[in-house]
Image: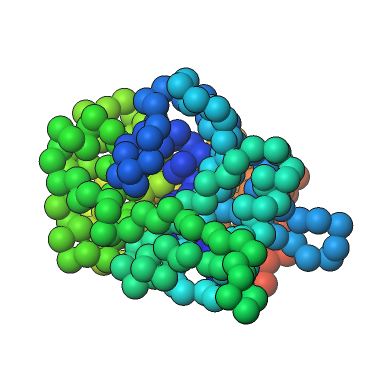
């Protein structure tokens, strides 16, 4: 099941490739600070009616070495089917792009991380045909960034730290450090990381803490975040004002009950429907005519 935490935990590698250098350092894999990174198609489906999709696939071209592919998977729990699907991903990508492949798995709990580290082997009577050895990021090797200045130096790493440690009772310290860092950065960067983090924290107490700290607009519509709710409420108020002003400009009487009904509506689809009808109606009753609710009494019409 794809969750908001799942999406944010691999999406950040697509959007913020500067995260790769500190991550490889944590994993003990040599990596130059400068590298060209491009996002590739994550579809590894063949012609058969079976869809397979890697969470994120990146082509990495280090300044000091040959290019390789990085397949990023986010794993929230143990899933024994991954023992074969991960091996398939690696073999397919190597075949398709003719490049070596590293598999990176991100986890938010230690037990899943212990299992995800593998190795996953295909063996027959003591003979190993192939073996898959994922690199794993988890609370065991991702640092808790609780210093504001450290967070400000690498916002991507600080955000990833908060997501990885979202289930830790001490996660508040990471969130406060990141909050302080985002207050000092430019608004667009703050908007992005704030929205990504709220999604990545999933259904945890840490998310509620973050909702209390932040109040920017969100880049991820449809996720039900506090950021998006604030934005949509503003949109609804604007639509309602436009409807009322248009009706008044056309000389159409708007009783208090109708005014309250329009002003209190938060359904953008319904508000847009009313706005489309506003130039053509002869009365407020006509505006609401197709609605299941009762029409408004004009008190003398």
The answer to which of 276 and 9 lies nearer the viewer is: 9
Q: Is residue 147 left or right of residue 185?
A: left
The answer to which of 150 and 110 lies nearer the viewer is: 110
Find residue 176 and report its horizontal and vertical position in percent.
17, 47
Farthest-out residue, front: 126
User: Looking at the image, which residue is at 64% across and 37% down?
Assistant: 99
The answer to which of 90 and 56 lies nearer the viewer is: 90
Q: Is residue 49 left or right of residue 132?
A: right
Residue 294, by quadrant, is bottom right
Specify the quadrant that holds the N terminus.
bottom right
Q: Is residue 258 left or right of residue 19?
A: right
User: Looking at the image, which residue is at 34% across and 29% down?
Assistant: 187
Q: Is residue 221 visible?
A: no
Above or below residue 36? Residue 166 is below
Q: Is residue 190 visible?
A: yes
Find residue 102 and report its horizontal and vertical position in percent.
52, 46
User: Looking at the image, which residue is at 22% across and 42% down?
Assistant: 178
Farthest-out residue, right: 47
């Amino acid at each position: 099941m794809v969750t908001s935490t799942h999406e944010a935990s691999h999406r950040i590698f697509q959007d913020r490739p500067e995260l790769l250098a500190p991550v490889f350092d944590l994993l003990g894999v040599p990596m130059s600070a400068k590298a060209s990174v491009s996002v590739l198609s994550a579809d590894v489906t063949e012609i058969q009616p079976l869809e397979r999709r890697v969470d994120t696939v990146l082509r990495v071209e280090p300044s000091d070495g040959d290019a390789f592919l990085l397949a990023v998977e986010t794993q929230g729990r143990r899933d024994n089917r991954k023992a074969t699907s991960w091996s398939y991903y690696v073999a397919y990508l190597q075949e398709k792009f003719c490049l070596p492949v590293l598999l990176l798995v991100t986890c938010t709990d230690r037990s899943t991380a212990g299992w995800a580290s593998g190795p996953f082997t295909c063996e027959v009577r003591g003979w190993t045909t192939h073996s898959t050895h994922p690199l794993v990021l988890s609370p065991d090797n991702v640092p808790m960034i609780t210093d504001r200045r450290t967070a400000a130096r690498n916002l991507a790493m600080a955000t990833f730290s908060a997501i990885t440690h979202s289930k830790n009772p001490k996660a508040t310290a990471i969130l406060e450090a990141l909050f302080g860092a985002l207050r000092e950065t430019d608004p667009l960067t703050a908007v992005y990381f704030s929205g990504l983090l709220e999604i990545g924290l999933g259904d945890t107490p840490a998310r509620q803490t973050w909702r209390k700290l932040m109040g920017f607009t969100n880049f991820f519509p449809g996720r039900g975040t506090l950021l998006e709710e604030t934005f949509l409420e503003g949109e609804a108020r604007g639509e309602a004002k436009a409807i009322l002003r248009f009706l008044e400009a056309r000389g159409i009487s708007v009783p208090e009950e109708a005014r309250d009904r329009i002003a209190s509506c938060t359904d953008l689809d319904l508000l847009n429907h009313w706005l489309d009808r506003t130039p053509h109606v002869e009365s407020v009753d006509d505006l609401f005519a197709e609605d299941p609710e009762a029409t408004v009494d004009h008190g003398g019409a």
